[in-house]
Amino acid sequence: MTTKRNKTELSDFRFEPKSHGCYKVTYTSPVTYKTWSAIINDMTLIDATKNAFEPKRRDLDLLKSIVKNG
């Protein structure tokens, strides 16, 4: 039995470098396993999530929102 979790985690994302200052970010829903992708060039947000020792939940939620909504 799987448990539903409401908290966005760094492990829900996949980061693929595309060019200098640009990443393809893929978010996979832990509940439905549906995926969304977007090209992100906001390195401040990448640093706050991918490169952070302990990313803040609001930064992860912001990244998820951008990836899902374009």
Image (cartoon, rainbow, N blue to C red):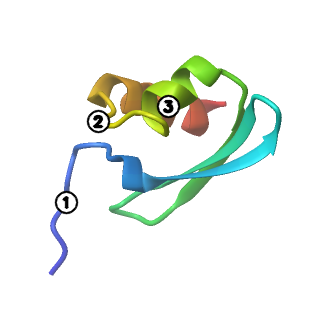
Q: Which mark is residue 4?
A: 1
Q: Is residue 41 left or right of residue 64?
A: right
Residue type indicated by callout 2: Glu
Depicted 45 relative to depicted 49: above or below: above
| Circle 1: element type | loop
The mark nearer the N terminus, 3 or 2, is 2
Please, is residue 42 above or below residue 37 in the view?
above
Residue 37, position in %: x, y?
66, 47
Q: Amino acid at mark 3?
A: Leu
Residue type beneath disc 1: Lys
Residue furthest to the right in view is 19
The residue that label 2 is drawn on is 54
> Taking 20 as reference, is 12 above or below it?
below
Query: Which residue in the structure is indicated by mark 3?
Result: 63
Quadrant assignment for the N terminus = bottom left
Q: What label does residue 39 carry, if any?
A: none
Task: Judge depth for marks 1 and 2 and give the one in front.
Answer: 2
**Residue found 50% across the figure and 31% down from its top:** 63
Which one is nearer the viewer's eye here, 45 or 2?
Answer: 45
Q: Is residue 59 left or right of residue 18?
A: left
